[in-house]
Amino acid sequence: MTASTSHSFLSYLADIKELVAPRLSQVVATASQHPRLQQALVHSIEGSSKLIRPFLVLAFARCVHKPWTAEIIDTAVAVELVHSYSLVHDDLPAMDNADLRRGLPSCWRAFDEATAILAGDALIPLGYDLIINLPLAAETRLALLKEFSHAIGGHGLVAGQMMDLYPNHDLQSIHDMQLLKTGALLKFSCQAGILVAGSPDPLLLDKAGQFGLNLGLIYQITDDFLSEQSTVEMTGKPVHNDANKVTFLTALGTAGAKSYLQQLLEDTHALAQDFENNDCLHQLLDFLAIRTF
């Protein structure tokens, strides 16, 4: 990827952040009547997030020629709220026991463990509230809610978190865990942009979903490399903390993980070709391949 491509992608990401971040802050600003919980909720969405999942919602809406209207932005915000909940809970002492998130003290460190648990709990219904109130046909909202619930619950993200806590050590189990823990919400993000746009073509939805699942694996492999090779200052979160975890690096070795990453990138670039206005999808893949955040 050239420096100009990287710059254009970061500019594109910044434009999306300008659209999504104010609405995200607005939704969270009055999310609780309890002052301490309210402070924890605000803290949970702050920091150096690139808003990749909201980016995917908007990017796939663009792929089917949907303008970035209020319902697209609110769907993107709903995804980010649930993603933020998952990070708050991932950082807890009973999970990853992480002190930093997005360059800031993790929620449980900034407040306390009980407050962080409740803050994470409170973020989930905020996401549902946004989807329930989208000005869309009832069948579209129901389809979104069904996919949203599947992505974040016991058949998706939460199942992946459980597998991470009690892992098997074979490659297939690592693969399956990451498809759930990281890939499920990315899959929903890609498909949601198409669903909200009113273009529920089954073939397009399947390809968008596969793009998201592949992206989850790509993201995790690059994250494994960052954890081994990067610094806290570059990532905004703890590094060198996977010594007791099963990762693609531990399972495949450095050369094997790089080879698998390259194959995933090639396959996912090919999937992107099936969509119009796909330049931003290719740029995202190129950016993640060399990411240093």
Image (cartoon, grey):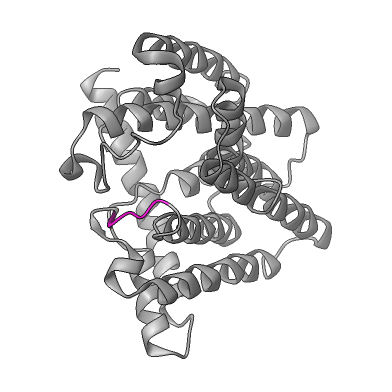
Residue at (35%, 68%) from the top-left corner? 108
Q: Quadrant of the C terminus?
A: top left
Q: Decide whether residue 198 is among the magenta residues.
A: no
Q: Which of the two residues, 78 or 169, is positioned nearer the viewer here?
A: 169
**Dominant SS in magenta:** loop
Residue at (79%, 58%) from the top-left corner? 142
Q: How far across and down, in percent of the image, does residue 221 sit?
A: 42, 26
Q: Quadrant of the N terminus?
A: top left
Q: Is residue 27 above or below residue 192?
A: below
Q: Decide whether residue 97 is among the magenta residues.
A: yes
Q: How far across and down, in percent of the image, does residue 17 sit?
A: 36, 52
Residue at (64%, 28%) from the top-left corner? 210
Residue ranking furthest to the right: 139
Specify start and end residues of the magenta stretch as a single range: 96-100
Q: How far across and down, in percent of the image, does residue 280 sit?
A: 44, 31
- Whether residue 1 is visible, yes or no, is yes
Q: Which of the two residues, 232 or 73, is positioned nearer the viewer here?
A: 232
Res 91 → quadrant: bottom left
- Whether residue 63 is visible, yes or no, is no
Res 176 → quadrant: top right
Residue at (36%, 23%) from the top-left corner? 289
